[in-house]
Image (cartoon, grey):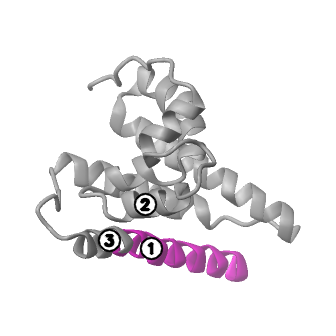
Amino acid sequence: MAKTRPVQHVTLRQYVKRRTGVALGASGSMRNMLRRSLGAPTFSGFWQHWNPVWGYYLSRYIAGPVGNITGASLATIVTFAVSGALHDLAVSAVKTKIIVFFTPWFVFMGMMVVITSQKGISLRRQRWGIRALFNLGLIIAGFAMAQVVENQLQLHAWYG
């Protein structure tokens, strides 16, 4: 299994500028992030541009170290699972009840990143709107699959 490449030391400022095209906190950074992520030609590219601050820490502290042990594909899925678990933890704290929705949703999206990357699926020659619909479609598909999982968990908890 292929290992991830060594992580170069990049500051958060450098990382954000690379991902959004503008400096951290600069005017237009949100617009650039949305435009670049939604219009990315690959689903992996979507995630490279989405929320660069969060991505910086995930890549530095989860994806890189896990990838050095397991390889890139499993590291991607683990990173998405950790991100989902952290989202679940935050929502659980706010709602003061255990929420397990984001973890399966993010795992599905991580799996889609791996599958679309391995299959070489790219919409590079398509217009921005088509690429955006494709990326949003995969996010919605992952959301729908997570809904099914959540419903199954609730049924299982209800009927024991």
Q: Which amino acid does label 3 sit on?
A: Ala
Confirm or deny contact between disc 3 and disc 1 (CB under 8 A). Answer: no
Q: Compared with residue 80, is residue 64 higher up or lower down, i.e. above or below?
A: above
What range is drawn magenta here? 137-160
Q: Distance between the residues labelled 3 and 2?
A: 19 Å
Image x and y of residue 13, in percent: 57, 33
Please name the residue shown 27% across and 25% down the image.
Answer: 2
Q: Which residue lies under the disc numbered 2?
A: 108
Which mark is drawn over residue 87? Answer: none
Tell me if label 3 and label 2 are in contact, CB under 8 Å: no
Which residue reaches farthest left?
125
Type of the residue with mark 1: Met
Q: What element carries label 3?
A: helix
Mark 2: secondary structure: helix
Magenta-drawn stretch contains 142:
yes
Position of the N terminus by quadrant: top left
